[in-house]
Amino acid sequence: MHIGYAAVYLTLVVIPATCARFRIADTFKGRDFFDGFNWETLDDPTDGRVNFVDKSTAMKSNLSFASADKFIMRADHAKVVSPDDRGRDSVRITSQKAWDDSTIVLDLSHMPEGCATWPAFWTLSQQGPWPHGGEVDVIEGVNLQNSNLASLHTTPDCIMDTQRPQSGSTVSTDCDATINNNQGCGTQFTVPKSYGTSFNNAGGGWYAMQKTAADGISVWFWSRMDPDVPAEVRNNNDSISPKSWGMPSAWFPSTNCDYASHFNAHEIIFDLTFCGDWANSVYPNSGCGGDSCTDFVNNNPSAFTKAYWEVNSLRVYTT
Ligand SMILES: *[C@@H]1O[C@H](CO)[C@@H](O)[C@H](O)[C@H]1NC(C)=O
Ligand SMILES: *[C@@H]1O[C@H](CO)[C@@H](O)[C@H](O)[C@H]1NC(C)=O
């Protein structure tokens, strides 16, 4: 009897875990972004030196552009910004849909780079209000950084162990957005070419983020020429099995962070801001020179020619 129970237990626990497959639910490629995302014009909540423009302005001024196989979002790189203006023209887009248990795969050929930039690819509770329902920052960094920071921002009582199975290194462990100036719990990537100029010079790569009640939140990254990128990711397969991808760069398990009370269905956001709470505060030591971050953004349009996202595809898989 005892052996019998043990066998049943193993069947229930081990097999679902190793066979967890996700199937394609939504694909965004080229013009799909114009149908599935909203262009937001709010004042940047992180106090960036930015003017988020609406969809028709973004399309007319070519700050958002789609071809059959590319979607591009950029900052203005022609105009000097007056000190009286809200900031440099840029784009922030949010998906209309939100997803519960899911794995998102972003095939990205270029991300915004350069002094004063603060781009992010992230997910957020559609229900809110922030930080209820959680925030997951998948790609984020500032200025001349070359390695990615993935982090969570949550309501209180969500803690990560410093040592856990992830290839990146733990920067902070308390995900509570109300403390430590909203630092959240973050993991800095140690695999090369995960961010900025190094990412772009390698032709970009793939980011994947799995978010499930069973396994918490994981983020993987593969540079374009990485021989270890899973074939099912490289080939855009309709069915994927993240369990087979090996150790993630960042893992945020639910061990000391009850999933149900901290997370719900998330929408997907891309944005590009300048200076603001993070990029501005570290600007003096960023290697970007003597101007204030704000003056740099206002007066140097040509410094922003590489401040653009170029997306090959964004795929959302669900169980
Ligand atoms: C708009 O941007 C795209 C992508 O950078 C570029 O290929 C295209 O030529 C631009 N169109 C105009 C009218 O400038
Ligand atoms: C991916 O899909 C292709 C074509 O549909 C198939 O031949 C291949 O076996 C799949 N690969 C994986 C790893 O699932």
Image (cartoon, rainbow, N blue to C red):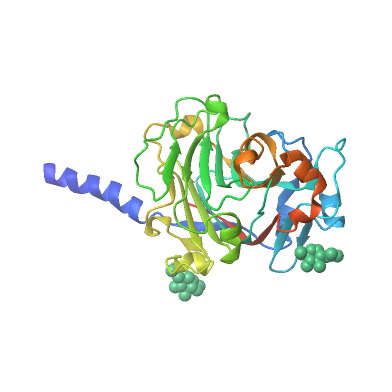
Q: Residue 296: give x, y in percent of width and height.
A: 76, 44
* Left or right: 236 as drawn, with respect to 170: right
Quadrant containing the N terminus is top left
Q: Quadrant of residue 64?
A: bottom right
Q: Quadrant of ligand 1?
A: bottom right
- The answer to which of 277 and 1 lies nearer the viewer is 277
Q: Is residue 116 above or below residue 174?
A: below
Q: Quadrant of residue 284?
A: top right
Q: Residue 120: give x, y in percent of width and height.
A: 63, 46
* Left or right: 117 as drawn, with respect to 186: right
Q: How many numbered discs? A: 0
- The answer to which of 56 and 193 lies nearer the viewer is 193
Give the residue displayed 72% in from the left and 59% down from the top.
Answer: 72
* Left or right: 12 as drawn, with respect to 26: left
- The answer to which of 183 and 201 lies nearer the viewer is 201
Residue 1 in view in this figure = no
Q: Residue 37: give x, y in percent of width and height.
A: 71, 50
Give the residue displayed 12% in from the left and 42% down from the top.
Answer: 2
Residue 19 in view in this figure = yes
Give the residue displayed 45% in from the left and 56% down from the top.
Answer: 191
Q: Residue 172: give x, y in percent of width and height.
A: 46, 35
